[in-house]
Amino acid sequence: MKYTEIMVRYGELSTKGKNRRVFINQLVANVRSALHQYPSVKIYGDHDRMHLVLNGADSAHVMSLLRPIFGIQSFSPVLKIDKDLSVIYQSAVEMVASVYQSGMSFKVIGKRSDKSFALDSNELNREVGAAVIAAFPDITVQMVKPDIPLQVEIRNEAAYLSCETILGAGGLPVGSSGKGMLMLSGGIDSPVAGYLAMKRGVTIEAVHFHSPPYTSENALNKAKELAVKLTAYGGSIQFIEVPFTEIQEQIKKHVPSGYLMTVTRRFMLRLTDRIRQKRNGLAIITGESLGQVASQTMHSMLAINSVTATPVIRPVITMDKNEIIEIAEAIDTFDLAVQPFEDCCTIFAPPQPKTKPKLERVEHYEQSLDVEGLIDRCLAGIRVEAIKNSDQFLYKSDTQMDELF
């Protein structure tokens, strides 16, 4: 079936009252970003629904790009036709033919907002249904949960036909709740945390700490690929690469082994907060899960978090590993996250990190470091890159593939 447009229905936006237009405009912007490969698709965000006029674009691929976008309750591929009864009957038969298999049931769901149209809703149901039955004598009518719910809507400008409703991702449009800085490692948890924050409308910018030569180019590219996965839910993501080598070397040189991870995480949080300030973010987002590793005990988080007064959002804090993995598999980040490229959180990991670090000792050890100088030099070397859903960073050559084996 050659559909002419896709009709999008909003999710939680229906409860937003006077702010509704702000949320709709944000969703339109996110959809336009996700469909950047299809500049011919025209997007119109009305009060009660959004229309995507395909202009010949591949409806199946466009719908696959719409499915993960937060703020969409459901959508339907639609045929827009003239309000001529013979055209409506013929188009209805053709639409049913495109999906019908022997033994299926159907129901016509007519709706007439153009009160000047010749048939009312009940008459529309009867006449269109008769045309379908004439074309498919063995089809059955079923009023509750039919296999083919044939929707016929008569509006002022045209008639619209559809027989499929696809559930969207729900949630709020990314960007409607402000911006947060996601501390994105190469692991399983932080992409899931970013996904959950995006579902509540947060625009994320990914902050990734890179420590060459201790971490490889593939470790960096893996983090970028994880960011690519997250673009499906709200459009382009700014990826901020933070050069962390000097800081890690200095921590390794001056801080006792048991406190290496605590001091390292404090520097990461300081740097992320400085980046947040420069880029007008409102919060920091992490993939911390309570008790999962030494730096994620209550005592560790207290010692680490003391370097900032900025809200730190921890979407997976109460989840166990299996729950996080289940989401990671659903959003297609798990297989990528478990690839064996070490990030800077693991390369200098001490054999026996403190699980109950004392804040006064942490602050004492940091006195031997030029904290502000290290931070300033680090910030001077950051790189910012826009990540799109069509980008690819890993496995561009056989050499990169060989590193896995």
Image (cartoon, helix red, strand yellow):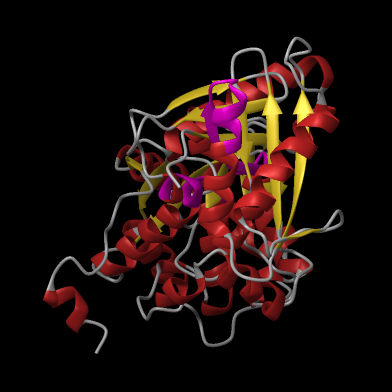
Q: Is residue 372 above or below residue 50?
A: below
Q: Nearer the viewer, residue 252 or 19?
A: 19
The residue at the point 65 percent across, 24 percent down is: 24
Q: Is residue 196 left or right of residue 209?
A: right
Q: Nearer the viewer, residue 54 or 3?
A: 3
The residue at the point 51 percent across, 54 percent down is: 98
Q: Nearer the viewer, residue 1 or 184?
A: 1
Asked whether residue 375 appears in the rendered view, the answer is yes
Q: Is residue 182 left or right of residue 289?
A: left
Q: Is residue 138 left or right of residue 382?
A: right
Give coordinates of residue 80: x percent, y percent.
53, 28
Give coordinates of residue 215: x percent, y percent.
30, 69
The residue at the point 69 percent across, 34 percent down is: 152
Region in magenta: 61-89
Q: Is residue 103 left or right of residue 341?
A: right
Indicate the quadrant containing the C terminus: top left, top right, bottom left or bottom right: bottom left
Give coordinates of residue 289: x percent, y percent.
70, 68
The residue at the point 51 percent across, 73 percent down is: 334
